[in-house]
Amino acid sequence: ARGYLGHPDANILKATVASLRERRASTSFTLLKGCKDNPEIESAFHSSKDGAKKDVPDEVPLEVAPTWRISGTMISCMTQGFAYRTIRDLKARKIQPRPKTKIDLDNIIDDVTEAYGTRVSAGDIWKSIRSKHITSTCSQFLWKAIHDLFMIGDHWLRDSMPEEYQDRSICAVCGNIESMDHILFRCEAVGQAEVWRELKSM
C-alpha cells in the first residue's frame, strides 16, 4: 500500500516487479525450505554467498520502462511521520556528498573490511554512530569528523582566510598539514602514543 517509498531495496524491487509485469505469461512462486537434497537450491545458496563476498558488486541494470514505472503511495496508508521521513529521504538524494566525506567513508569501510573481514556500507557506518551504546557527544564528534567539519588543516588555507591565519593549518609538532587522521593517529606529540597504548590495554 505504501509502494516503494522508504524501502531500502526500492530500486531492485521496482526493476523486479516491472520485469515480471512485462511478461505476457503468468508467473508463480514456490516457497522452498532448506537446501538439503536439492541441488538447485544449494547452488543458488552458494551463488548468493559468493556474490556477497565480492569486493566490487556486479552491475545490474535497474532501468524501468515508463509503462511499468509506479510511484507514490495510498493516502489512506500515509501517516505524518512516514510522509516526513519520505520527504527527507527524497531531499537527501539530491544532495551531492562532500568529496572529503566520501574519502573518509571509503577509508572507514576499507579498514573495517581489513580488520573484521566483513564489508559494510556507508549506511551501516552512519547507523553505527547513532547506536545507543555511543554517547551523543561521541556520536556528534564522529559525525563531524567524517564530514571534515572541524576547523583544522586545509580549512585555514581557504582563499577567503586572512594570510596571518593560514599558519594554523600546520601541525606545530610535525610540520605537516593537520587533519583529524593526523591528530588522532599520526602526530608525534608527546603523550599520544601513551593514550592509545592505554586504550588498547583496556
Image: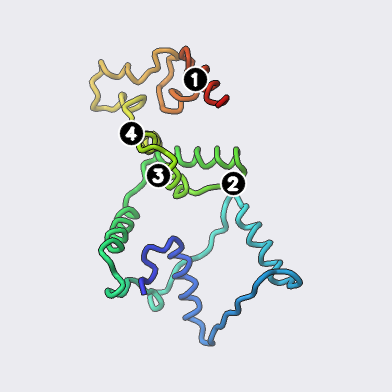
* Quarter of the rendering occupied by the N terminus: bottom left
Marks 1 and 3: CB-CB under 8 Å?
A: no
Q: Give the CA distance from mark 1 to mark 3.
A: 25 Å
Q: Give the CA distance from mark 2 to mark 1.
A: 28 Å
Identify the residue under disc 4. 149
Instruction: In the rendered structure, find residue 96 and report the number of the disc placed on it.
Output: none
Q: Residue 130 location, x and y as percent?
A: 40, 44
Q: Looking at the rendering, which quadrant does residue 133 occupy? A: top left
Q: Amino acid at mark 1?
A: Val
Identify the residue under disc 3. 130
Q: Nearer the viewer, mark 2 or mark 3?
A: 3
Marks 4 and 1: CB-CB under 8 Å?
A: no
Residue sitting at x 43%, y 47%:
127
Q: Amino acid at mark 2?
A: Thr
- At numbered mark 3, what does the secondary structure look like: helix, strand or loop? loop
Residue sitting at x 31%, y 63%:
82
- At numbered mark 1, what does the secondary structure look like: helix, strand or loop? helix
Identify the residue under disc 1. 195
Along the viewing direction, whichever of 154 and 119 lies nearer the viewer: 119
Identify the residue under disc 2. 118
